[in-house]
């Protein structure tokens, strides 16, 4: 079993930055593909960014390309989402997710484990 705990959310003005963290426990992070999702009220859950176990491959939703960066530190069992140039439409609950996946695969579906989420609110 894998436990995921997010932190770093908050209220920020448009144009500002936040860095989300996800602490993983229960198995080595190096065995997991990782992703950040978000869910806004009345909208479907959306994959924002994902990273392979190898750290070489990443995925970004078109809406965040060039603004968000996903990274991981396997030694610290942590995954991060650096969010810059934030917009009001980025307001959502952000969830960390993990998947047992192949070394070079960036998981985009079928995640096995989920955190509880952290709220990000961007004011205009």
Image (cartoon, helix red, strand yellow):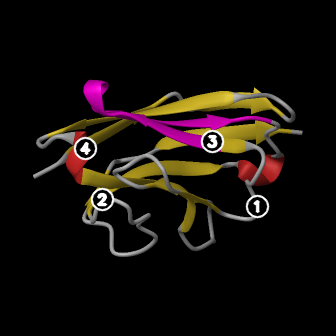
* Rendered image quadrant of residue 72: top left
On the image, the x and y values in percent for residue 119 come to 55, 41
Residue at 34 percent of width and 51 percent of height: 53
Badge 1 marks a residue whose secondary structure is loop
Q: Quadrant of residue 73?
A: top left
Q: Residue at x 62, y 34 (%)?
A: 82
Q: Return the disc, 4 or 2, that comes first in the chain's sequence.
A: 4
**What residue sits right under mark 3 in the picture?**
69
Q: Nearer the viewer, mark 2 or mark 1?
A: 2
**Position in image of residue 115 (x %, y %):** 33, 48
Q: Residues within 10 Å of mark 4 (few under 14, many from 20)?
A: some
Task: Choose mark 4 or mark 2, whichever is in front.
Answer: 2
Vertical comparison of 52 with 47: above or below = above
Q: Earlier in the sequence, mark 4 or mark 3?
A: 4
Marks 4 and 2, how far apart at CA: 9 Å
User: Is 86 in front, or is 98?
Assistant: 98
Q: Which residue is mark 4?
A: 30
Q: 25 or 32, which lies in front?
A: 32
Residue under the image location 28 percent in, 43 percent down: 4
Q: Is residue 44 visible?
A: yes
Badge 2, how many Cα within 10 Å: few under 14, some, many 20+?
A: some
Tell me the tag on residue 103.
2
Magenta stretch in the rendered image: 69-84
Residue 113 shown in magenta: no
Answer few, some or many: residues within 10 Å of disc 3's Cα (few below 14, many 20 plus, some between 14 and 19).
many
């Amino acid at each position: 079993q894998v436990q995921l705990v997010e932190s770093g959310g908050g209220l920020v003005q448009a144009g500002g930055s936040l860095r989300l963290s996800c602490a993983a426990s229960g198995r080595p992070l190096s065995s997991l593909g990782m992703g950040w999702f978000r869910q806004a009220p009345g909208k479907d859950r959306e994959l924002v960014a994902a990273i392979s176990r190898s750290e070489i491959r990443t995925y970004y939703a078109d809406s965040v390309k060039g603004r968000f960066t996903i990274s991981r530190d396997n030694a610290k069992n942590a995954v991060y989402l650096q969010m810059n140039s934030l917009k009001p439409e980025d307001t959502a609950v952000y969830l960390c997710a993990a998947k047992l996946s192949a070394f070079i695969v960036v998981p985009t579906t079928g995640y096995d484990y989920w955190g509880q989420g952290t709220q990000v609110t961007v004011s205009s």
